[in-house]
Image (cartoon, rainbow, N blue to C red):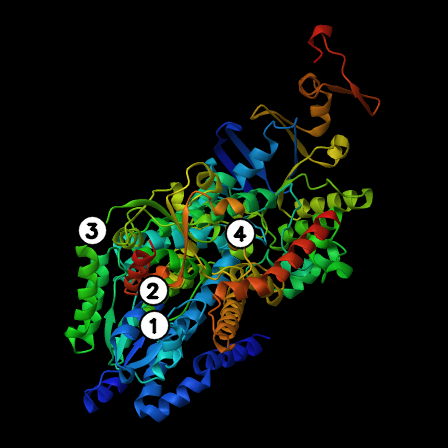
Amino acid sequence: MPGFASLLAASAAIRVASLNMCADEYLLLLAKPGEIASVSRLSRDPADSSLWRLGQRYPGNRGDLESALKARPNLLLTMGGGGRSTNVIAKRMGLKTVDLPFPMSIDDVSTNLSTVAAALGEPQRAAAWRRRLSQLRGSKLALRDAIFLGAGGNSVGAQSVEAEWMGLAGLKQRPVPGGRASLELLATRPPAVLLRSSYRRSERSIGQTWLEHPLARPKTSRILEVDGRPWTCAGPLMVAEVERLRMQL
Amino acid sequence: MRLFLVSLLILGAAAHLLLPWAPLSEAQTIDPGLADLILIELRLPRTLLVLGYGAVLGVSGAALQAIFANPLASPDISGASSGAALGAVVGGYWLGFTQPLLLAACGAAGALGTLALLVTLAGRKADTATLLLAGLAIALAAGAATSLALALAPSPFAFYDAFDWLMGSFTDRSMAQAVAALVPAGIVTLLLLRRSRALDLIALGDDVAASLGLRPKRLAMEVIALSAIAVGACVAVAGAIGFVGLVAPVFGRQLSRGHPGKALVPSGLIGALLLTIADLAVRAVPLDRPIPVGVITALFGTPLFLWLVVTMRRRVTA
Amino acid sequence: MTRLSARELAIPGRLQPTGLDVHGGELVALVGPNGGGKTSLLRALARIEGAAGIVTIDGEDIDDAPMARRRQLLSFLPASRDVTWPISARDVIRLGLDRVDELRVDEMISLFELDKLAKRSVNQLSTGERARVLTARALVGNPRLLLLDEPLSNLDPYWVLRFLEIFECAATSGHMVLAALHDLSQLDRFSRALLISEGRIQMDEAPANLVASERFEEIFRISSANGRWSIRTPADPRSLP
């Protein structure tokens, strides 16, 4: 009998290993400590995840099946991984698998929350999150012109899930050519609100140097520093981000 | 010498299968069957893929060098690997990944396309400079197209998979994938090996070969098509890996005393060995971040490639 | 006596439909201006891709002969002496045989005085040394018909004469030798000369007659007098290029 099926039969307790930082978010936010077997190493890295303190309580994996196995999971949580057959192999080894699609909208985030909660055996755990979400969506705010600014001027798409989150905070992401805001754009047509990402701020890179340029802080814009880490996955952690932005604006 | 090579290869394969040892011994303590499962479902496909892909690169690199009469021809420089990656990406993200064999076919089609483009652009009897320029141009174009395809793909995660496609990865490849790549690649490689003697005779020049009863143009088409299919199938599963196809034949020809056709088998063995060592380095070195296999092959391949260019220069000016 | 019979030999754009008969023992020179068709004729006889026509040796059609048999019938030496790969001289000669015959290879090595060069890579030899190795390869299989494109180029005088001796020897023992030549000074060693120009065999004579003919002087634009060559004065001064 495949190794994990026996484990599964032995105890009804779920133990989940998540192989992807964005999938980790759902697991860390919804699961009880005994249910988390392993998270990806990125979720244990302060530079990449705002949940790193929580993540460091659990063993880390390198994003592949073999490194997750030693934590004895009986369910595998994945997101992405095109050329790999991780789920196929995991099933053959007797593991249950849940593959989350990358969210293209806030509805997708909500669906993912429900999926993970259901996989953990208690769909009601997602209810609190859904409530917070509907509260945010319920109160429509007037939209102000805004640009999200990351390293090197990289921004987000005007139709992207990140822009949808900004909408909940009363900010309308301006469409910028190539998804990148140039210094010239910031100088000639500065946005009403500028969100500057602090992701990996202390590291030396061309992108960070770009952000230090005086023109990247237009004088007429309302500038807000944001923690860039939740924005990478644009998942449930954005709920707190939006609530915080609403209070600041 | 060959015996030594084969024993090294067996040793390397065993090491690749069993190292790193820690996860296996940990698995043993969890559940007696678990270590076996890891070996069979995770390690075995990976080792088979590494050996097979390496051998394919060696053999097709040697065959391409023989038919282009140029020691710098190879799947990567000719653009075949990049074309295969493009084919696999377009096929995978637009047609879906569930059919490994179909994906292998897409990879083969991509490789065939770029090789056909190379022959059209540079011609078969091109001098080194023309061949290199045309091949590199095609490889760059295909690589750029692959990145574009990944950026525009329906799945937003595709872009993060770029490393895997453009620099190679053997992580979490299933036995089904290994079979889908290696069975066609294996058949086609055997067909290539059958042409070893003909490739030896091509070394005397197309005219002499034709006077002996060979058909050089048809042989060239066959070698190009067979190499493309073999490389394409492997790239579709594990991404494009460079330098092995360029470097293994150099050593293969040392063993065959310069004969380009006899070098096919030793090049295959050496290619398998090189890729096994590269993938071992990727896995056994305890780094928290994954390094793609293509980076390791570039690391040892680049100095060898430079040495090759220098010796070629010396020969031309002598 | 062995005989070669070729009919309707043609290569589009290079060689007009041509026929040719050669007997064993003949040492035939192919002469003519650059691009005139000497090489094309040799290549057509060697059945290199794109050649039309039928070539038979002793009644046997070459196109129907399997590879092993072809080597016994003919061998071709191209004008280019380039070899890409670092193969030893001895191994290159071995490529001319499809079975192992070290005695025969040794014969060729001593015939072409390659003893000291046998183990060296052929692409590190001088052009003249390479010419000897490649010619040895062409001869090692002992084919009935030898097709040689500019066999005497890149050779120093000693070797020019040695090669001619070797070819004469081959002819005497019954083989047929066709050699395309650029240098006309050795023409008198050949038993028959073909003048090829504009894709056709223009003349087919004994060398002495060929050289003396008006046709020859027209095509080559040189004339011979007292054993010396000089540029021929054109009939019409305005036709100078």
Q: How many marks?
A: 4
User: Where B176 sits versus C241, above or below?
Assistant: below
Q: Are marks 2 and 4 on the same chain?
A: yes
List the residue tagged with mark 4: A212
List the residue tagged with mark 2: A81
Q: Nearer the viewer, mark 3 or mark 1?
A: 3
Residue at disc 2, secondary structure? loop
Q: Nearer the viewer, mark 2 or mark 1?
A: 1
Distance between the alpha carbons at the discs numbered 3 and 2 = 37 Å
Distance between the alpha carbons at the discs numbered 2 and 4 = 34 Å
- Going from N to C along the chain, the mark reached first, 3 or 2, is 2
Q: Position of residue B286 (x, y in %)?
A: 51, 78
Q: Quadrant of residue B233?
A: bottom left
Q: Are marks 2 and 1 in contact (CB under 8 Å)?
A: yes
Left-right relation of C213 to A147:
right
Residue at image x 46%, y 42%? A182
Q: Is residue B246 visible in this depiction of the protein?
A: yes
User: Where C31 sits versus B132, above or below?
Assistant: above
Check disc 4: other Cα within 10 Å, few if <14, some if 14-19, many if 20+.
few
Q: Are marks 3 and 2 in contact (CB under 8 Å)?
A: no
List the residue tagged with mark 1: A19
Residue at disc 1, secondary structure? loop
Identify residue type, mark 3: Lys
- Going from N to C along the chain, the mark reached first, 2 or 4, is 2
User: Where C122 sits versus C35, above or below?
Assistant: below
- Depth check: give the residue in front, C123 or A43: A43
- Which chain is indicated by disc 1? A
Q: Are marks 3 and 1 in contact (CB under 8 Å)?
A: no
Check disc 2: other Cα within 10 Å, few if <14, some if 14-19, many if 20+.
many
List the residue tagged with mark 3: A140
